[in-house]
Image (tube, rainbow, N blue to C red):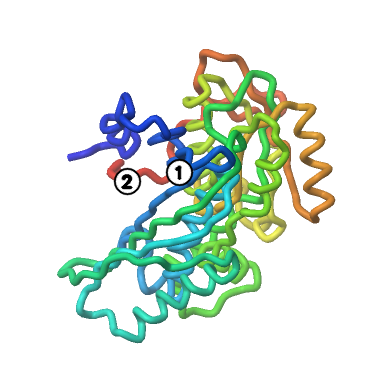
Amino acid sequence: MIKDEFEWINSITPRHFFQKEVVQGIGDDAALWSVNEEMDQIVCVDTMVEGVHFTRDTLSPFQTGFKALAVNVSDIAAMGGIPQFYLVSIAIPTEWSEDELQEIYRGMGDLAEKYKMDLMGGDTVSTKGPLVLSVTVIGKVEKGRSLLRSNARSGDSVFLTGITGESAAGLSVLLEKTRHAAFTSNEEKWIRQHQMPIPHIEQGRILAGSGFRISLNDVSDGVASELNEIAEASNVSIIIERNSLPVSESLSDLPEADVLNHQLFGGEDYVLVGTAREKDFKVLSDTFKQHGLQLYEIGKVGEAGNAEVYLHKQDEKPKLLMKKGFNHFRER
């Protein structure tokens, strides 16, 4: 039995490539290879399994489709790219009606229209197990502009392109009440963030367009987990300042410990987290403001050679943040 998702992935990662066009294989948000002198192609795939990633009590069929595509588009955003095409593989149990399945595809189509993405094909099979929805997205990014996890360097500013924690709070409410219950206005906000996340494509394009050396990850498994991936890929330490983490006013009535746990470990926020040179961050911050977008500085990259992430709270010793966001196969 596999005990850790990330250790398993590392064990099957190729140590060399046969194709000279490969720019980035396993180990980032998406694969990347050269297609011409101007552009690289981006490809990513994510799978949603009923009973693992969602239930009918947490997502409607429309929301299931919307989110299945959104999580892939978010990976394209983390590479600074433009999403273009998608393919869908679906394993259908007998209890799902044709109307419900049409709603899944309508949900995907709703988000695809926003980014002018084309559905190019896929595979449809029956199953005696739960519904399985696997989406592949293909995109592009200008050559040399990809925002790899391995780009972080000592002294860099660490940033977020949005607030984290609301999605985890929304899931907590859904698991307690189901999506058919009555909710407060704050709960409705959290649930919306969980059910229909909006990928930060515009933010990723601004970052890629800057030409700066930037490392980037999308927050799918939690801020702590994503920053640990950057730290490992770049072989640097990262220090987050507790008081610099942006927090939603809608979470203010929750216990502080719960809010912090949602912010760092909840995941499924699909904002972007990354690093840039301090002087470049200031330029990026101004550019984001000009576009009506937020960019939050939450910490610094520390010394090289120590791939760990720490949380620092005023007058306290930095606390090690383990890579304990969502992890398939880990005992919970």
- Using a 10 Å C-alpha cutoff, classify the residue at mark 1 as few (fewer than 14 neighbours), some (14 to 19) or many (20 or more): many
Q: Quadrant of residue 238?
A: top right
Whether residue 239 appears in this view of the structure is: yes
Q: Looking at numbered disc 2 in the image, what kind of residue is underneath it?
A: His
- Using a 10 Å C-alpha cutoff, classify the residue at mark 2 as few (fewer than 14 neighbours), some (14 to 19) or many (20 or more): few
Using the image, determine if residue 65 lies above or below residue 43. below
Q: Residue at x 50, y 31 (%)?
A: 228
Q: Nearer the viewer, residue 144 or 241?
A: 144
Residue at image mark 1:
30
Q: Secondary structure at mark 1?
A: loop
Using the image, determine if residue 59 lies above or below residue 329. below
Residue 314 location (% of width, % of height): 72, 28
Q: Nearer the viewer, residue 240 or 232?
A: 232
Q: Quadrant of the C terminus?
A: top left
Left or right, 170 with reference to 297: left
Residue 212 location (% of width, % of height): 70, 32
Report the mark closest to the observer, 1 or 2. 1
Residue at image mark 2:
328
Q: Distance of mark 1 from mark 2, alpha carbons?
A: 19 Å
Q: Looking at numbered disc 1 in the image, what kind of residue is underneath it?
A: Ala
Residue 181 location (% of width, % of height): 49, 79
Q: Quadrant of the N terminus?
A: top left
Q: Residue at x 49, y 45 (%)?
A: 41
Using the image, determine if residue 38 lies above or below residue 316. below
Q: Secondary structure at mark 2?
A: loop
Q: Residue at x 48, y 26 (%)?
A: 233
Q: Earlier in the sequence, mark 1 or mark 2?
A: 1
Q: Quadrant of residue 135?
A: bottom left
Q: Nearer the viewer, residue 10 or 147?
A: 147
Q: Quadrant of residue 97?
A: bottom left
Mark number, residue 288: none
Q: Residue at x 67, y 26 (%)?
A: 300
